[in-house]
Image (cartoon, rainbow, N blue to C red):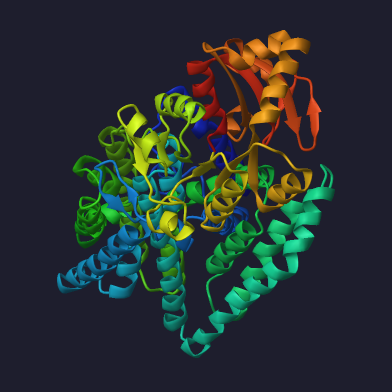
Amino acid sequence: MEGLSLFLTVFLALVIPIVMARLRVTTVPTAVAEIIVGILMGKSCLNLITQTSQLTFLSNLGVIVLMFLSGMEIDFDLLSPKKHTRARKSESGKQVKPMVVAAFAFGGVAVASVLLALGMKALGLFNDVALASIIFMTVALGVVIATLKEKEILGRPIGQTILLTAVMGEVIPLLLLTIYSTVNGGDARKLWLIILLFVAAIILLRRFKRPYLWFAKVTKATTQLDVRLAFFLIFALVTVAEQVGAENILGAFLAGVVMKLLEPTQATKDKLTSIGYGFFIPIFFIRTGVNLNLKLLFANPQALMLLPVLVICFFLAKLPVTLTYMRAFNKRNAFAGGFLTATTIPIVLPTLQVARKLNAITATQSSAFILAAVIVCIACPIVFNSTFALTPEDKIKEKVVIFGLNAVTMTVYQDLHDSWYSVQVLTCRKEKYDTYKSKVKNLKLFPDRKLDTLEAAGAFDTDIFVATFTEDQANLEVGRAAKQAGVKRVIVSQGKVVADTVDQLREEGIELFAFNNLHGAMLRALIESPAVYRIITDTNNALYDVVVRNSAYTGRQLMDWDFVDQITVSRIRRGDKWISPHGSTVIEPGDELIYSGPWREADRIHQLLSRE
């Protein structure tokens, strides 16, 4: 019977996503579908899958891997002060600081969760205020990230704000759960030892940062050192967590954080995600459904009355998010964002698992919480996808600031503006400003080029900064100031190219644009390769390069791409080598493609392939 239960579980893990794809079920997370199928196959209905030692082991490992991957989901760039101290314009035209808005939103969630937990205790529905508060304030970070990526708003102010709220909704409840379990486990004196977890994490990070860079170079198919390191981190920090009296899921989560700080390659992330979501995690979700006993739930009037109350509480707990977002974004998208943060299932399940182990909750109450979380998790993505509407500001790819006004930058401004870039042009010359102010919508006159003036005016609050003065030294000074201010990409133009300057700029992460070299290269291309020159100068077609990050198009032959007939792939860069493309060439994560095609299609394909 044990072998049959394991076989059915693995078989269902394979079939569920296939059926969902066949039926085009896209609004319900796969985890929820796996729990529902588990309910049908478990003790609630058919009882075909039973509790076995094999399933228990694999399920426990699944929840650990789930928390590890959750730790890897955190984008620390979003938490950097430079990224969030400056306000950014939202789709409503208001100045928004995502970190500030997210902090206020989650603060409201924490207060609302405690009040709802107190209300449930007063009504005699659930007496553990601390546990209920932790559960109500959780947010499913993985589901939120996947939904925001699908909408392509992860880098927008509203997307960043929702994401930061979700990060707080995962990290803070997890830390509170550790404190809760330590106190209720009868070993409160060891609470201070949890600090050792963080010390261990820091030590591992410092000790393994350099070796990891070496691992990435020497790893091969038969060793997979990066994957071995990941599982070493998991078991090391889980062991430390258990030794100091904390929960193993906190150790797994911290292992994911450490792995993220090691800056693994996209290929490593894909391998770890494949291992987790391809095998271990589905078993955890299916087994969760198998263990639910809805017969007992429906036979218990008090527990049955608890179910609708919990569903309402899950939504009411996130009401402060909607109210806070409405002050920064349009009401429709604020409502959708608030609904999305009510998704909780991946964190609720480990929380309830800990509570059951501590005997802080009955099996029937746990089933009510899980079923309520499943209902909410089904409703939230549906409401978000049907309510959220992209505004013109949401469609902006990146913000570009060009300092220097001339015929070239005017052309670039128009082309980028038409391609959904947010472009601002700056100038210090009054006569240039008067000439072009009627043609350039977002043109700003500066009194001087002093760095303090530029910083105070927000000139460096951008994704890409371009310095195109006629003086080379001025471009270098402003470009370096922009880089120090945290601008992601800085481009400076140089009339006279000096080899030492090129090397120095490359080390500083600053890109160089040389007009003289460009003109010479274009003339040479026209003489030696007229076809290449026509591709570059063609106004109807575009030449693009893209790093392939979309896993839907990796591991497949080039000929199998559904849009391959719309573009011409010229070269593929893999690591430090260039390879010639063929129809049978298998595209790997991180490959850089040089291709050309009609600019609208080429641009759409660029967005599709670069999407993570």
Taking the image as shown, residue 365 lies to the left or right of residue 420, namely left
Residue 36 in the image, given as x and y percentages of width and height: 40, 42
Is residue 555 shown to the viewer in this render?
A: no
- Which residue is depicted at the point 27% across and 47% down? 339
- Of 24 and 484, nearer the camera is 484
- Which residue is depicted at the point 56% across and 58% down? 484
Q: Which quarter of the picture shows residue 27?
A: top left
Q: Is residue 84 above or below residue 416?
A: below
Taking the image as shown, residue 372 lies to the left or right of residue 556, namely left
Residue 599 in the image, given as x and y percentages of width and height: 51, 17
Taking the image as shown, residue 447 lies to the left or right of residue 501, namely left
Residue 74 in the image, given as x and y percentages of width and height: 51, 56
- Which residue is depicted at the point 65% across and 63% down? 234
- Of 68 and 427, nearer the camera is 427
- Of 377 and 325, nearer the camera is 325
Residue 47 in the image, given as x and y percentages of width and height: 45, 45
Q: Which quarter of the picture shows residue 46?
A: top left
Question: Going by the picture, which residue comes out furthest to the left?
Answer: 123
- Assign the C terminus to one quadrant of the image: top right
Is residue 505 shown to the viewer in this render?
A: yes
